[in-house]
Structures are given as C-alpha cells and as structure tokens.
Image (cartoon, grey):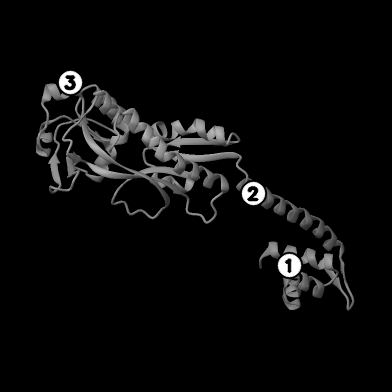
Amino acid sequence: MDRLQAMRVFARVVDEGGFAAAARALDMSPPVVTRMVADLERHLGTRLLQRTTRKVALTDAGQAYLERVRAILFDIEDAEAHAAASTRELRGSLHVLATPVLATYFLAPLVAPWRARYPRLLLDIATDNYVAARVDEFDVTFMVVPEDYDGNIVARNLFQGEAVVVASPTYLQRMGMPQTPADLGHHQYLRDSAMAMHNPAGRKLRLQHLQGQFAAQEVDMPHVALQSVSTELLLRAALDGVGVAVMARLLIEPYLASGALVHVLPDWMYSRYTVYAALPTRRMVPARTKAFLDFVTEQVPEAVALQRAAAGLVNY
C-alpha cells in the first residue's frame, strides 16, 4: 500500500463528501478509492469513516487522523514547492569539484565574471586529484581525461589540449637537449603519480608524433627524481631544473613564452586530453547548474584565447 497516496485519497473523500465524488475528482474508479481507504483503516487498526447510503462521516479517530494528515500533506506540498523554486531560481550554492590545476588555472579566473552575472549564486569549489569516483557527490565535476577515455558519465565536452614533455633551460644546459624520444631515458624524470597508476612499473613514457608521421615511441625512464600527485609541485620542480616533466600545454604556455620552460622534442607529445564538465547521474538538471554550464561553455573560447595570447601563441 502506498500510504502517502492513501492519505491523499482519504482526505479527498472527506473533502468531496463521498467515495464516488472523490473518485471523480481523482480520476480513479470508485472501487479503487474504497479499497485504498479500507486498506488504510486496516493498516491503522481503526475505522476512520462511518459509511451510510447517503454520505460518509468521520469517526473520532478519523477526525484526529485527518488533522495530522492535512498537516503532513501541507508540509509535503510546501517542501515540493520550495524544491521546485530552488531549482528554478539562480540562488543558493552550486557545489563544484575539480582537480587542483583546473580549479586554479581554469575555474578561478571565471569567478569574478560569474559573480558579476549571478551574485546570489555561490560557487562552492572543492578539489581532489581523483575526481571521477565522486561525480555523483557534486552538481558539476570538472575532469581531465585522455582522448581514448570511455567512462560511463553524463558530461559536456569543454575543450581539448595536449600534454608535452618540458624542462628548464638550466636543466637542459646541464644534461643536454634530447634529440630523439629514446634520449629521454638518460634524463631525470618528474613522474605524475596518476600516470604511475596506469603503469605499475612507472617508468614508461609513450610519446606520439604530433603530425602522426612516425609510430609512437615507448621510452623507459629509470631515473625518477620525484614522484607526486601534485601537478603544481612537479611544475615547480621542473622550473627549478630538477628534471623533465609531462605537463598540459595550456598550463605551461606562459612559461614556454617567457623561456622559463622549453618544450622538449617539439615534434612529439605525450597525449591529447579532453576537459569535461560531468554531471551526476540524475534526470533533472537544476536551472542553476544549467546556467553555470552554459556560462562556462561561453567563457571557454575567451579563456583559452587569453591564455594563449598571454603566452604569445597565436596559432596552436
């Protein structure tokens, strides 16, 4: 028995003054209405209505129960109305998850224009290096995935980029500039722990030719100087001349432009990646979430263009 539906039917029978009238109002058959009230009485162990040939009347127990039922139904309708309003109105909080790098270099520059447009909607941004398993915990999750990613997620494709091998000029002066992918095997390697998860040996780099003119090259990297899940830590180590590192090109373009970093083997890359805005697996997307997704999608071309312009790269 659906107790909530039975409560609604019981209240309508009282309001309409009989089973037949309630059935018409509810677009249900009279036997169904009669049975639902009888099931409710049987569940409660007491009679709620006195039935006569002309009308129904509340028993004392029925009167007391009706007062509680009306309060419950009112609270439910009020809660539903409040939930619907919060879904429609752009107010409250939007809970966002992103990797630390995306939060710092992609989302942070969007906060000011977002606040200017939607001052009553607070962005609550959390960070995690491993976001894929937490998509259902947040309104929107920003994640970086490889081009062959085949996850079962509901997501909006925001932009693509490349991850390349970089090093500082001082490091390359000291250790020499690699001329071929195989030359990397002699260099100090700043290893991303996330990459190590996919390669337990942890010492392989698979490089692809940017134009696809040559077969992919797999290089053993035995000299691991530092391993971390923190991209910013690895970036700092690369800038300090500790070794070579794989970095998202969009992140390090300003350093390439300033000469603080050098793209090692400029005809080669580690991988292409895609940045997605993933949604929890539920049917309804609140209006505030849709507004945020539309805003981010609108801002992406400008944000990427500004980053590249700052790096002095017109065509990339």
User: The residue tagged with tag 3: helix, strand or loop?
Assistant: helix
Identity of the amino acid at label 3? Thr
Q: Residue furthest front?
A: 314
Place of residue 157 in the rendered image (x, y in percent of width and height, measured from the top left): 39, 48
Label 2: few (<14), some or many (≥20) within 10 Å? few
Tell which tag, 1 or 2, sits nearer the viewer. 2
Residue at image location 34% in from the left, 28% down from the top: 310
User: The residue tagged with tag 1: helix, strand or loop?
Assistant: helix
> 76 or 57, which lies in front?
76
User: The residue tagged with tag 2: helix, strand or loop?
Assistant: helix
Earlier residue among tags 2 and 3: 2
Q: Is residue 39 left or right of residue 228?
A: right
Identity of the amino acid at label 2? Ala
Which image quarter holds the C terminus? top left
Label 3: few (<14), some or many (≥20) within 10 Å? some
Label 2 to label 3, Cα distance in Å? Answer: 58 Å
Residue underneath mark 3: 170
Which image quarter holds the N terminus? bottom right
Tell which tag, 2 or 3, sits nearer the viewer. 3
Residue underneath mark 2: 83
- On residue 270, the disc is none
Count the numbered circles shown: 3
Identity of the amino acid at label 1? Leu
Tell which tag, 3 or 1, sits nearer the viewer. 3
Label 1 to label 2, Cα distance in Å? Answer: 29 Å
Earlier residue among tags 3 and 1: 1
Residue underneath mark 1: 40
Residue at image location 62% in from the left, 48% down from the top: 88
Earlier residue among tags 1 and 2: 1
Residue at image location 12% in from the left, 21% down from the top: 174
> 212 or 200, which lies in front?
212
Q: Is residue 180 left or right of residue 157?
A: left
